[in-house]
Amino acid sequence: MAAGVLLCAIAPAESLAYAHASPPPAAVDARVTGAFEMFARVTAAKNVRGEHVGELLKRRWLISPQECAGSVCETLDLNRERSAGIDESLTLRRVAAGTYAGSASFYVALSCKHKIYPHGSRVPYRITLTIGGAVTVQGIAFARQITATYHNSKRSDSTPCVLGKSHDAARYTGNATSAIPQPPASTTTQPVTAPATPNS
């Protein structure tokens, strides 16, 4: 009897790596507060001066939670550093467990026919923030690791020149750099005693 032939396909290295890769951790509810050091990779950059896909960026974010009950906060006030040291603020609202999103816009200057237009292009964008790791202090979880996405789908052009289609996007990962905050101390009420009145 002739020996059988066994054929097997070899999966590409990328497929094997994907098969053994751990799934990303589920988002967790926690208070996001303090300073975060954010590292970004540009994932899209079409017709955006000084920016290219794959570029690595380092930014500082300051976050203040609002409307909190335990580990869950309804909104986050985000002050984020942009290029050239420009800071801007926006509000992120809780859209799912451990996930916040918000939209805003900013302007960039454009040069056209030897003239600078300070508000040459309006850039609407959306940021989605996800909590990836936290520590618990006295029953309240505080975020220590976060991820985020920045997405701008279209930029306007208010100059006489033709900018053409323009958009960009990026993915962020970050760690808290400020100390773990302490929950507010519990307050105790002291019984109130009526002042003694002299005998008449």
Image (cartoon, rainbow, N blue to C red):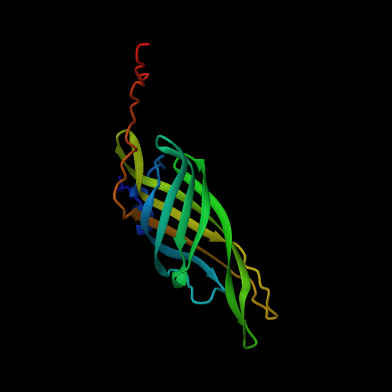
- The residue lying at 38 percent from left, 46 percent from top is 132
Nearer to us in this view, 74 or 22:
74
Determine whether, in the image, residue 172 is placed left or right of residue 167. Answer: left
Estimate the x, y position of residue 193 in percent, counting from the top left.
Answer: 35, 19
Going 33% across and 27% down the picture, which residue do you hit? 188
Residue appearing at x 30%, y 34% in the figure:
138
> 129 or 35, which lies in front?
35
Location of residue 26 by image quarter: top left
* Residue 39 relative to residue 45: left or right: left
- 65 horizontally vs 183: left or right: right
Which quadrant, please, contains the N terminus?
Answer: top left
Above/below status of 153 relative to 29: below
Q: Residue furthest right?
A: 160
Instruction: Point out residue 18 in the picture as x, y percentages from the top left corner.
Output: 37, 52
Q: Is residue 160 above or below residue 121?
A: below
* Residue placed most toward the observer, 65 or 153: 65
| Residue 87 x/y as whole percent | 47, 64
Residue shown at the point (41%, 56%) measured from the top left: 62
Q: Residue 123 in the image: state x and y as whole percent.
A: 59, 65
Question: Quarter of the image containing the C terminus?
Answer: top left
Q: Is residue 193 left or right of residue 164?
A: left
Query: Is residue 63 positioned above or below 139 on the image?
Result: below
- The answer to whether one can see residue 9 in this image is no
| Name of the residue lying farthest toward the front | 200
